[in-house]
Image (cartoon, grey):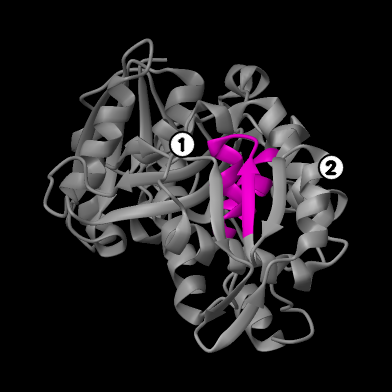
Amino acid sequence: MKTLIELYDNEAIENILAPIAIHPERVIYLWDESVNGLVDGNREGGIRRFLNSQKPVLSAIFYEIESSELKDIGKELEGILSRYEDCVIDFTGGSGILFFALSMYAKDHHIPSFFIDFSTGKMVNLFGCERLTREFQIPSLTSKELFRITGGSMYRYGNFEDIWKEEEFQDDIRKVWKLYFQDPDHWHDQMEYLEYANEQYGSSSSALTILAPATVNIHNRVYQNNRKLLEEWKRIGIVRYCYTENDMIHIMFKNDAIKRCVTKMKSSLLLYLYALAKSADFFDEVRISLMVDSDEISRQYHNIASKIDLLLMKGIIPVFVKCTIDVPTRQDLEGLYMQARKFGGRLSKMLLVTTKDLRYAHPAIAEGARSLGIEVVDRYDLPQKNFLSQLYWIVNRN
């Protein structure tokens, strides 16, 4: 096949799925102004840049259909499609009068056509695409490719060093959180105490030790060091020593990574989720703490960046995960929704993870999340078995 005809769709992934699966020589994008608005240079540039990165290299040509009259659209299609040989039409995701006009044109001129059924992951033959249907396989996308399609780029991969990726460290994180599930409230208090103690009394960001008062006052609330929990951390090996002398607590952590994890509550939660996702051996890619430039092409909004806590890729399905140690706000929900829609479109899955009780204490927030298509994992779902079950269900549901 030489020419693939695509109805440009506002869903980013649907624009490139057939081209990278069947590798035509060129892709003709028909842009319907009444449906898609004016031609967006950033989105067009993102598609060109993505297709140019493919092997073999694919060329993209964009045609804007300006008319809203069926007869005139038919003439425009005749003028465009007659220039190219060996055409096949992809009807995945199209809509509006252009979709109807192209359907009529394909029928009248006996042009091979198909669409992709995302619920089954199969190509459906409409006319003359029997071989393509038999050979079609849903491709996979990487996170870099996902952002490239929409004209963005990943310019920083996390705030974490290579040690965070090591199995030993991930095992330590899982041990820490196993203790969390035994007594969440005291664990939270200890983390708040350590976060404050490290900020106020830690010698430096790289030191492994903390020397701080055993009792501190944080925002008119008194926190005491939890000696029992520290002894448990010592038992599992993440703390080398801990003792109290003259009402001062002396703590030495196993390494700097562990120290920063257990003195930053959100980092601890995020790294726990990362360790679980990696241990599942289910995802093609697991990315943590990503910074994404939303407009790599024109640089018009270069200073506007998106922070993604956790991104999981399974085939063409991206799962955007936001984690918080607080009760999420409506702004948190809308931010996650907009992020997922921008970079992954309707194929995106969204997951909000919190250590708070949303199910019983904040049901309105949980319902608000569900109304946006966001799945919620709260403190009751955080144990490994529950969390991984949620992930499997989210990815596989239609």
For the record, the magenta segment spans 249-275
Magenta highlight on residue 218: no
Q: Residue at x 58, y 74 (%)?
A: 326
Q: Amino acid at mark 1?
A: Asp
- Residue at 63 percent across and 41 percent down: it is 253
Residue toward you, 136 or 376: 376
Density class for disc 2 (Cα within 10 Å; few <14, some 14-19, many ≥20) is: few
Q: Residues within 10 Å of mark 1 (few under 14, many from 20)?
A: many
For marks 2 and 1 on the same chain, the one whose residue lies earlier in the sequence: 1
Q: Position of residue 35 (x, y in %)?
A: 31, 62
**122 vs 136: above or below:** below
Q: Residue 127, located in which quarter of the rendered image?
A: top right
Image quadrant of residue 354? bottom right
Q: Is residue 32 visible?
A: yes
x and y, in percent, of residue 28 in the image = 29, 32
Give above or below for 119 relative to 216.
Answer: above
Q: Is residue 163 above or below residue 316?
A: above
Q: Which residue is mark 1?
A: 90
